[in-house]
Amino acid sequence: MELKDRESTIYLVPVDGGAPLLLLSGDFQPGDPTWSPDGKSIAYGGESEATTNATEIRTLNLESKKSETVPGSHGLFSPRWSPDGQFLVAQSADITQLFLYSFQSGAWRQLPAPKPPKGRFVGWPAWSHDSRYLYFMDGLDVYRARIPEGSVELVAKTANTDIICPVFAWGFWFGLTPDDRILVLRDRGIEEIYALDLEYR
């Protein structure tokens, strides 16, 4: 199944085709859903249409269709569920901080910031396949935090690479392969011409 969010709804779409199933709608505007490792729940961020700038993280049990707010998640969005199911990570509303939620302790804590807060941007959190590390972009560099300790190290400098975000033309993006190698999308511009062999495409 594939999750898709559009405006204030989230649909469940069968990967082999079929009609989308409406999972969420209403006055709470959900977005950026993420699967639980067992595939039985999703976590998502959003805000109420009645209250602006009131983001929070919620989880939805797909069997019971019951949605619950993750305690202490006010002001957070864009959750990412760890592959081992023990943690959620989310961004602050001003996209300058990352917070880690432990399902065991039921508490959030801020991850250490590798750079001064002024003018910084933290985004694109991505879990390693074994949940031991959380990778994220701070400015134009990629860091990883050891989980659960939270110690941070620089793993890739991209300041001199013409990377681009596939969604927002003004932003940046990176991702991870299944074996935790770093992926970036480069901006090759519009000044090159390529030939495509139609017989061997």
Image (cartoon, rainbow, N blue to C red):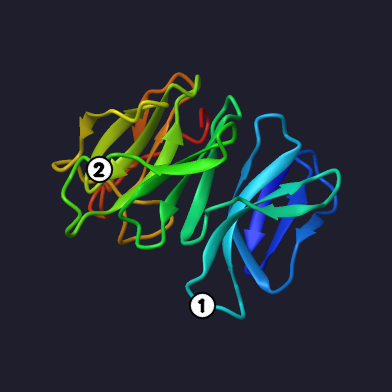
Q: Residue 166 location in percent, x, y? A: 41, 51
| Residue 146: assigned label | none
Residue toward you, 185 or 47: 47
CB within 8 Å, label 1 to label 2: no
Give the secondary structure at mark 1. loop
Circle nearer the N terminus (1, 2): 1
Residue at x 42% of width, y 30% of height:
176
State left or right for residue 186 relative to residue 128.
left
Q: Residue 136 location in percent, x, y? A: 34, 39
Count of numbered circles in the view: 2
For label 2, the residue is 113
Residue found farthest to the bottom: 50
Residue toward you, 51 or 199: 51
Give the secondary structure at mark 2. loop
| Residue 52: assigned label | 1
Which quadrant does the N terminus fall into?
top right
